[in-house]
Image: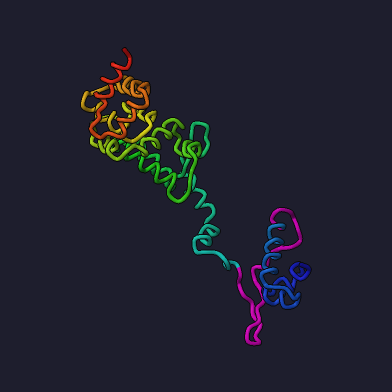
């Protein structure tokens, strides 16, 4: 540490100082970085030298270390801080309180734009949301809600929609039924129940209230009757409703 604080020795490379102190050059590098950080935090007497002395093949020369460890992108950022700050401000979306919501070059911004497109079905929006939230890492519904500026309820509904059986999602994509109309099918126990209710709703042009009533009937069926909806492919919702009437008498 003392050599790094010495005006002359601090100009030497990590390897040379390590040889003098009988430690690794990685240790010297770590200590040098700590001194640099301390200097930035408080007015210390240590200042990271931008020129270091290097000895190779018996020759001592000075090496510029300004850009060591920096990628070209990092160098550009450091050399154009004002311009980068200006561009960042131009490409930032803020809410009514002036808080940054999301940057335009962020994938979340693109998703936010897609979720507002009228030419995409709810299923397509659900697919894009699910891909973003569970692609490389898992994002909570609350975090997604904050990033997108959308309600937790809407985010949750889209994720539920993504979990619908393929047959149901295809019906929604084709415009045969609205996602909002069948929102309550999540209350059903099996994909077979969900699919048959949606088919029944399409065939009979049911609205959301009527779909909800149908689901209530299914939930009130005795387990032995309700089980037929899942186990018997030919057993329809109409069959279940008829048995419900007989059961209710």
Instruction: Report the front residue among 82 and 47.
Output: 47
Q: Is residue 86 left or right of residue 201?
A: right
**Which of the two residues, 129 or 245, is positioned nearer the viewer here?**
245
Quarter location, residue 247: top left
The magenta segment is: 39-65
As for residue 56 lying within the magenta part, the answer is yes
Please name the colour scheme applied to the rendered image. Answer: rainbow
Residue drawn at (34%, 24%), measured in percent from left and top? Answer: 218
Asked whether, in this view, residue 218 is left or right of residue 3, the answer is left
Say which residue appears at 32% left-offset and 38% top-offset: 165
Q: Is residue 176 magenta?
A: no
| Residue in view at x 74 percent, y 68 percent | 4
**Residue at the left extreme, as displayed:** 203
Rendered-image quadrant of the C terminus:
top left
Residue 227, picture quadrant: top left
Residue 188 position in % (x across, y down): 37, 29
Residue at 29% across, 33% down = 195
Counting from the top left corner in percent of width and height, residue 192 is at 31, 34
Please identify the quadrant where the N terminus is shown: bottom right
Q: Residue furthest right?
A: 2
Q: Is residue 225 above or below residue 73?
A: above
Q: Nearer the viewer, residue 220 or 28?
A: 220
Residue 97 position, x and y percent, is 52, 32
Measured along the vertical axis of the image, is residue 47 above or below residue 140? Answer: below
The residue positioned farthest toward the bottom in the image shown = 58
């Amino acid at each position: 540490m003392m050599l790094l604080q010495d005006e002359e020795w601090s100009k030497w490379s990590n390897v040379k100082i390590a040889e003098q102190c009988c430690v690794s050059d990685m240790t010297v590098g770590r200590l040098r970085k700590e001194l640099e950080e301390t200097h930035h935090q408080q007015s210390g007497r240590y200042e990271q030298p931008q020129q270091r002395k290097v000895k190779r093949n018996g020759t001592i020369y000075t090496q510029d270390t300004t850009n060591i460890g920096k990628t070209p992108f990092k160098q550009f950022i450091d050399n154009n801080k004002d311009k980068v700050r200006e561009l960042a401000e131009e490409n930032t979306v803020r809410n009514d309180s002036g808080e940054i919501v999301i940057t335009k070059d962020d994938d979340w911004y693109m998703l936010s734009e897609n979720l507002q497109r009228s030419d995409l079905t709810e299923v397509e929006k659900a697919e894009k949301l699910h891909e973003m939230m569970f692609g490389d890492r898992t994002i909570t519904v609350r975090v997604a809600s904050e990033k997108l500026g959308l309600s937790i309820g809407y985010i949750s509904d889209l994720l539920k929609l993504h979990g619908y059986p393929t047959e149901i999602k295809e019906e929604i994509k084709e415009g045969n039924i609205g996602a909002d109309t069948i929102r309550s099918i999540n209350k059903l126990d099996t994909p077979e129940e969900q699919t048959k209710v949606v088919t029944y709703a399409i065939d009979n042009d049911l609205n959301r209230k009527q779909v909800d009533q149908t689901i209530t009937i299914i939930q009130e069926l005795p387990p032995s009757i309700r089980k037929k909806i899942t186990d018997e492919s030919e057993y329809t919702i109409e069959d279940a409703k008829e048995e419900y009437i007989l059961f209710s008498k």
